[in-house]
Amino acid sequence: MSDHLILGASDAAPRWVGVRRHQVVAVLLAIGLVGDWTIRPRSSALEVVLGTLLAGSAVCVRGGVTGAEFAAIVTRYRLRSRWSSVGLQRGATGWELRSDATVEVAGFELEHRGRLDLSGGDVAVMDRLGELLVGLSLRGPTAHVSLHVARLHDRSATLMTLPTDTPPGEGWRDQPGLLRAVVGLDDDEVSRRYLERWSYLRSRRDLLQVLRVRDFGSVSSGHALLEHLQRTSGSITVALHVEVVETSKAQGLAARAVHRLGSDSAATRAAGFRRTAQSARAMDRVVQREELVAGGEAMLRLALYMVVSAASLDQLRVATRELTARAERSGHRVELGHGRQALWFSAALPGGPGW
């Protein structure tokens, strides 16, 4: 994929001149409060305190999370229930998966025939998948597709979930058992409950930690994430979620992204700052995306999660450290999801009920 597309940092969060909106608002309010306290006589010292807190909330504290975002994460973690559940049962046309929401999906397993990369089968599979995504974008409305590469006890398997009215194409077979295994249910289970802790989830069988790849900005050719994960100890499932945006909406999104970055670049140069290599790469990326969408390609919103499971907390921490180190060596920036484990686990499930 990176051989054909310019991948980089996520641009899902709106930015003003390269800075996230809440950071701009916090800094402007902080300057206003402190400036008012400095100029106006007999002003309250509370303005300085509030201004300092607002300025601190705009600073990134860890993993790209600002002080304001961290405070929001802690607040939501304290307020929501520690218990969550996941259930799977037969629906009218597919499988109903219940978590934060209920989604109905069809699950298919990739038919592995030897080494796909040596036979050229991996390229054929990706070409067929690309055609499927383009078809979903033309059909509309927005559709959700997910791919899950799971390391089971005796083998590795690839699961794809699709809308129930979409055929998978050649090379995939209906496999409810694999869907149940990726969800984390035994053959005789209808649902399973999880207890959320700050950095992991606990069930009656094992412990889980969900990590998310934040961006692909440092990925170079020859650094495949799955190749590194195959050498990592522990049970790992990689979940790639793809939201296929319908064509009419995608064209507007692509055009607005180019306009926003162009305006930010013009404002930055007008203020006397030079255009950095990072901003130039981001501009090239959105221009390429607009050209591809205008040419009929599908616009995709991507999210990549990694679910690590272990029998004990010590084993989980060791596997997570090893996985994080391997992912970062391959150029993937990883978030640990502290305080958001239940939310990310729901988002990583087949069909993405937490999206």
Image: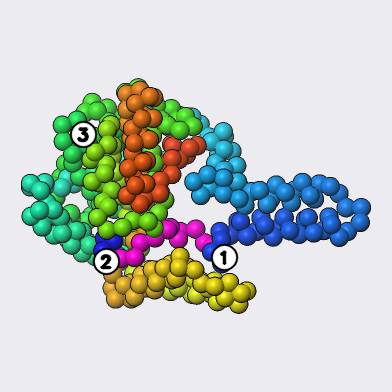
Residue 306 can be seen, yes or no: no
Q: CA distance from mark 1 to mark 3?
A: 44 Å
Q: Which residue is located at x 24 percent, y 55 percent? A: 222
Which one is earlier in the sequence, the residue at label 2 or at label 1? Answer: 2
Residue 109 can be seen, yes or no: yes
Type of the residue with mark 2: His
Magenta stretch bounds: 5-16
Q: Which residue is located at x 26 percent, y 63 percent? A: 3
The residue wearing badge 1 is 16
The front one of 74 and 236 is: 236
Mark 3 neighbour class, 10 Å CA radius: few under 14, some 14 to 19, many 20 or more: some
Locate residue 107: give its quadrant: top left
Counting from the top left corner in percent of width and height, residue 134 is at 25, 65
The front one of 180 and 278 is: 278
Q: CA distance from mark 3 to mark 2?
A: 31 Å
The residue wearing badge 2 is 4
- In the image, residue 59 sits, relative to residue 314, either above or below, namely below
Type of the residue with mark 1: Trp
Locate residue 290: give its quadrant: bottom left
Type of the residue with mark 3: Leu
* Front position among marks 2 and 1: 2
| Residue 152 - label | 3
Secondary structure at numbered mark 1: strand
Farthest-out residue, right: 42
Q: Which residue is located at x 27 percent, y 52 percent? A: 223
